[in-house]
Amino acid sequence: MSYIEVDHVHKEYIRDGKAFTVLNDVSLNFDKGEFICLLGPSGCGKSTLLNLIAGFENCTSGQVRIDGQVVSQPSIKYVTVFQQYGLLPWRTVLGNVELGLESKGVPKENRQAIAEKYIDMVGLTAAKNSHPAELSGGMQQRVSIARAFAVEPEIIFMDEPFAALDALTRMSLQDEVTKLCREQGKTVVFVTHDIDESIVLADRVVILAANPGRLKTIVPITIADRSDRNSEEFLTIRNHIFEEFHMAHEEKIEYYI
C-alpha cells in the first residue's frame, strides 16, 4: 500500500447550472518520503488536485487515501505553504514560527527553542525579532517554510510558494527546500508550472494535461547533481519534460479554475 493513494479521482464544479469537469479519472500513488511535483499548464487542475489530497475539497467521485485513511478534511498532521505567506503582521519572525507550535499545544518553555532551530535552518536568526513588514518577500517565505517544518508535519503541501519571488531568491529557496526535505525525509506534494523548478525539487514529476485535467505522464528524476542546471543530464531531462509539457499545453482550455 502506498502512503498517498489518489484512486480514480473525478472533480466537477457547478457554475451557472452547468457541470464542468476539472479533473477526470486521476489515479496516482506516492510513497512516504517522496517529493512529488505536480506540473502542467494553467487550468489543468494541479491546485485542485493538491486541495483534494490535502482535504480542503472533496472528490466528486473516487477517493484520496493517506496511510490507508480516506481524506475528507484537512488534518493537523499536514501543513500547507501557499504563495501568499500568511504571516501575522503584529508578530515577529519568532512569534510567527511559534504559532503552529501553540496550536499543537507545545509547552511554552519548549516553543522558543524549537522555533529558533528552524529559523536558523532557513538562515533568519539575525532577523528573528523583526516583523514581516521589515522583511523581503523571500525572507517572508522563509518564515512560512520554517513555520511549516517546526510543527514536524507528516506531509507538506506547497502551492506555487515561490511564484512571486525574483529569480535569484527563487533558486536559492528551491535549493534550501529540497535540502531540508531530503535531510528530514519529508513527504512533499508541490504544485508548479516551472519545469526547472520541478527538476531541482522532485523525485518524480507528475505532468497533467488540461481540458479536462488528467494525468498525462510521470517522469522520474534521477539526476545526481541538481545544482548544475546546465549539465547535459539536466538539459536532457528538461527537454523531455518540455516536450511532454508542450503537448499538454497544446490542447485548448475551455474552463479555468
Image (tube, rainbow, N blue to C red):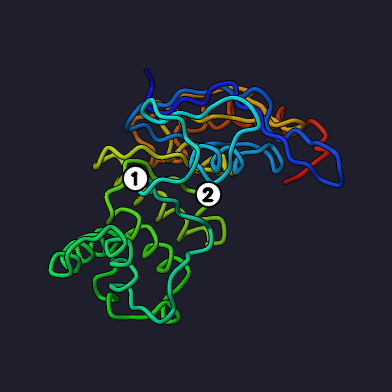
Tell me the tag on residue 5.
none
Determine which residue is flagged by label 2. 159
Q: Nearer the viewer, mark 2 or mark 1?
A: 1
Q: Is residue 156 above or below residue 4?
A: below
In depth, the one of 151 and 248 nearer the eye is 151
Q: Is residue 37 above or below residue 127?
A: above
Image quadrant assignment for residue 12: top right
In depth, the one of 36 and 229 nearer the eye is 36
Could you say whether the residue bearing mark 1 is in a helix, strand or loop? loop
Q: Residue at the location (40% across, 55% down)?
A: 173
**What is the crowding at mark 1: few (fewer than 14 residues within 10 Å), some, or many (at least 20)?**
few
Could you say whether the residue bearing mark 2 is in a helix, strand or loop? strand
Q: Is residue 126 above or below residue 221?
A: below
Residue 210 picture location, percent across and down: 73, 33
Residue 248 picture location, percent across and down: 70, 29
Q: Residue at the location (47% across, 56% down)?
A: 170
Q: CA distance from mark 2 to mark 1?
A: 17 Å
Does 156 sit left or right of 163 as displayed?
left
In depth, the one of 233 and 140 nearer the eye is 140
Image quadrant assignment for residue 239: top right
Q: Amino acid at mark 2?
A: Asp
Does 76 sit left or right of 39 as displayed?
left
Q: Is residue 218 above or below residue 197?
A: above
Q: Residue at the location (54% across, 27% down)?
A: 63
Contact between marks 2 and 1 (CB within 8 A): the answer is no
Does 83 sit left or right of 107 as displayed?
right
Determine which residue is flagged by label 1. 77
Of labels 2 and 1, earlier in sequence is 1
So how many labels did they put on this image?
2
Residue 231 picture location, percent across and down: 44, 34
Residue 144 picture location, percent across and down: 39, 62
Q: Amino acid at mark 1?
A: Lys
